[in-house]
């Protein structure tokens, strides 16, 4: 028995030494390749300085992620990146993880000064956009365009709302009172009554069947129409938006969260690709879990499909943090709060090692870090904050494989949501 105990103690010592060696190796590899960013400039959204030259310009689509939808600094870093990157005049579109038809209203605000910005953001039905930081981003893009230096448009690549799509179809192709316009109004009315079902993707089979029958009638009339409206790009996008909304909310698909996530991300990838044009580049903004190049823990990601299609022409920047707070609906509080804690990472998390680098905000290229690890074992998880507050913050994944670049902000705070009391 004594000899067995000695062997166990020796094994534990060896494992401990090995773990410490791996720990030191990863921190050393990171420290060798991280680039300090000008924190004041970056966290005010003004730019990232000379570090922009470290980011490859050889892309057609650049994804910029975020670990949560409710972190103030992630908005600021994105705007700083955009300001620095759009010196490249071929970048002319910014895609948002928001409904296609609703996002088009942003362009009317930016270019024609039409509409109420807060009302437009509310129409997204995604409260993470209803915050001071995103308003500042929109106003910054508007100012860049007005200065004559840029001509940047927003586009949406998500499909989670039917409302503006139905309104566009009615206004553009069926403005006169007839059976089709009545059907479109009926659909909008029913979706309004089924607000929670729209938000939660939880239609009953009967409700969905009724909605689908009315929708099929509208689609049939569109197909047989000879109207010029069918050649309008916004009309086509609105029809696509609504068809994808129906596909996402089919009860058969909604019953399987993995399948539904896969459908959503694959459709978002299709929508991004439809916006690409030869000679132009676009930036897309979404959660880390959507833009990452590999499958995420839930399903194949949008970035997975974009990477398969575009290869080296798809680049992605992930954003991480080590501590602080984030804004989200907190079940215990029963409301949106900005003090949901960013939990400290354990030894099996990338954040543990990123937190040991004494730099407030830094950037590194993942491909440069990997060779310095000499094939050693890596942490198995990193933070992925899903919609809403959660204590389950870390999921399996390889930060160095999922992104081309990572920008890490050590200390973060919740964004200034309009729903904070």
Image (cartoon, rainbow, N blue to C red):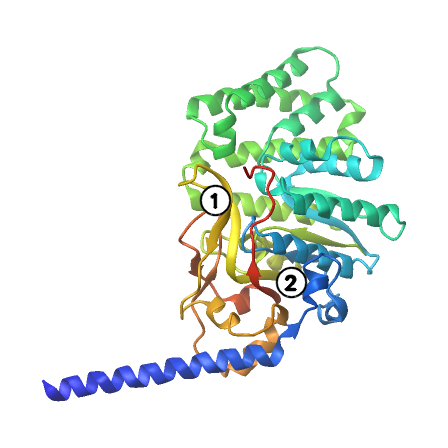
Give the answer, above or below, for where 262 lies relative to 191: below
Name the residue that disc number 1 marks: 388
Disc 2 is placed on an element classified as helix
Q: Earlier in the sequence, mark 2 or mark 1?
A: 2
Q: Tell me residue 95's x, y (percent).
A: 69, 47
Q: Position of residue 46 (x, y in %)?
A: 75, 58
In the rendered structure, the answer to whether residue 313 lies left or right of residue 198 reads: right
> Measured from the top left, where is residue 312 in percent x and y?
67, 65
* Residue displayed at 40% across by 82% down: 20
Q: Which residue is mark 2?
A: 311
How many numbered callouts?
2
Q: Secondary structure at mark 1?
A: loop
Q: Nearer the viewer, mark 2 or mark 1?
A: 1
What quarter of the picture does the C terminus occupy? Answer: top right
In the rendered image of this protein, does residue 208 appear above or below residue 77? Answer: above
Q: Quadrant of residue 220?
A: top right
């Amino acid at each position: 028995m004594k000899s067995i105990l000695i062997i166990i103690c020796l094994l534990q010592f060896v494992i401990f030494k090995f773990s410490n060696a791996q720990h030191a190796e990863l921190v050393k590899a990171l420290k060798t390749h991280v680039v300090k960013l000008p924190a004041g400039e970056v966290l005010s959204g003004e730019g990232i300085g000379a570090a922009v030259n470290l980011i490859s310009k050889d892309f057609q689509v650049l994804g910029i992620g975020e670990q949560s939808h409710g972190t103030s600094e992630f908005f600021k870093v994105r705007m700083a990146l955009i300001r620095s990157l759009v010196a490249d005049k071929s970048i002319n579109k910014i895609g948002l993880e928001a409904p296609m038809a609703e996002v088009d209203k942003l362009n009317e605000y930016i270019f024609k000064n039409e509409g109420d910005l807060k009302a437009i953001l509310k129409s997204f039905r995604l409260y993470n956009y209803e915050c001071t930081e995103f308003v500042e981003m929109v106003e910054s893009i508007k100012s860049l365009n007005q200065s004559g230096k840029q001509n940047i448009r927003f586009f949406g690549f998500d499909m989670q709302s039917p409302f503006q799509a139905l309104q566009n179809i009615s206004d553009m192709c069926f403005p006169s009172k007839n059976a089709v316009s009545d059907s479109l109004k009926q659909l909008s009315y029913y979706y309004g009554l089924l607000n929670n079902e729209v938000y939660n993707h939880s239609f009953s089979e009967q409700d969905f069947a009724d909605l689908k029958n009315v929708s099929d009638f509208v689609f049939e009339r569109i197909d047989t129409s000879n109207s010029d409206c069918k050649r309008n790009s916004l009309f086509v996008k609105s029809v696509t938006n609504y068809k994808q909304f129906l596909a996402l909310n089919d009860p058969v698909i909604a019953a399987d969260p993995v399948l539904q996530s896969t459908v959503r991300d694959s459709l978002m990838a299709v929508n991004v690709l439809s916006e690409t044009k030869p000679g132009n580049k676009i930036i897309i903004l979404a959660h880390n879990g959507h833009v990452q190049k590999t499958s995420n823990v839930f399903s194949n990601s949008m970035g997975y499909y974009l990477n398969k299609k575009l290869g080296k022409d798809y680049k992605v920047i992930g954003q991480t943090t080590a501590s602080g707070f984030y804004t989200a609906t907190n079940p215990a509080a029963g409301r949106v709060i900005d003090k949901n804690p960013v939990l400290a990472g354990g030894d099996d998390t990338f954040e543990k090692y990123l937190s040991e680098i004494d730099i407030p905000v830094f950037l590194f290229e993942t491909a440069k870090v990997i060779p310095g690890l000499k094939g050693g074992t890596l942490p198995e998880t990193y933070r992925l904050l899903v919609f809403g507050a959660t204590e389950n913050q870390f999921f399996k994944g390889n930060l160095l494989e999922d992104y081309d670049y990572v920008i890490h902000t050590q200390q973060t705070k919740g964004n200034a949501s309009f729903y904070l009391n």
